[in-house]
Image: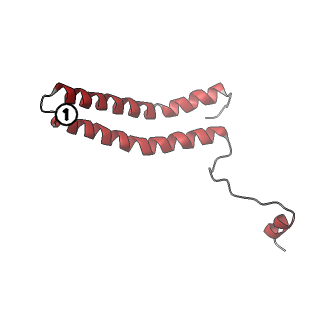
Amino acid sequence: MGASETRAAAGLFLTPNPILADEIRNVLWNTVSFLKAAGLPVGVIMVLFSALLYMTAGGKPQKIKRAHTTLIWSLVGMAVLLIGQGFVTIVCNFLNIQTC
């Protein structure tokens, strides 16, 4: 009888860790890395979209304002994503985790 059969017979079922992190700092770091990898391309697409809005505004103030707002918020979103790793360091310091 192998080890897995022994555990199953004893009522113990082991499952692999789905988040691949054993500590909170690894969870935070993996989350920030994922959001940065997924969010930055979206931010770039939004900047390009705002450029398209500017080009097709035709001098209409309402459309120019929409393009400007889209550009500002896409840049704010990208800035938040880029400072996310600094946020992880702040949380680690707050939680007294020495190595982050």
How many residues crowd mark 1 within 10 Å: few (<14), some (14–19), many (20+)? some
Residue at left offset 61%, top offset 42%:
27
Q: Residue, x 63% and y 26% (percent of image)?
A: 93
Give the number of callouts.
1
Displayed quadrant of residue 31: top right
Kind of residue at disc 1: Tyr
> 25 or 16, which is in the foreground?
16
| Residue that protrudes farthest toward the left in the picture | 58
| Residue furthest out toward the right | 10
The residue positioned farthest toward the bottom in the image shown: 1
User: What residue is shown with label 1?
Assistant: 54
x and y percentages locating residue 37 in the rendered image: 44, 45
Q: Is residue 97 left or right of residue 74?
A: right
Residue at 56% across, 32% down: 88
Q: Of 54 and 90, which appears nearest the observer? A: 54
Query: In which quadrant is the C terminus drawn?
Result: top right
Residue 50 position, x and y percent, is 26, 36
Report x, y in % for residue 1: 84, 74
Secondary structure beneath label 1: helix
12 vs 58, left or right, is right
Q: Is residue 36 above or below residue 98?
A: below
Looking at the image, residue 8 sits to the left or right of residue 72; the answer is right
In which image quadrant can residue 63 be found?
Answer: top left
Q: Position of residue 35 (x, y in %)?
A: 48, 42
Side (left or right) of 100 relative to 86:
right
Give the image's coloring scheme: secondary structure
Residue 96 position by quadrant? top right
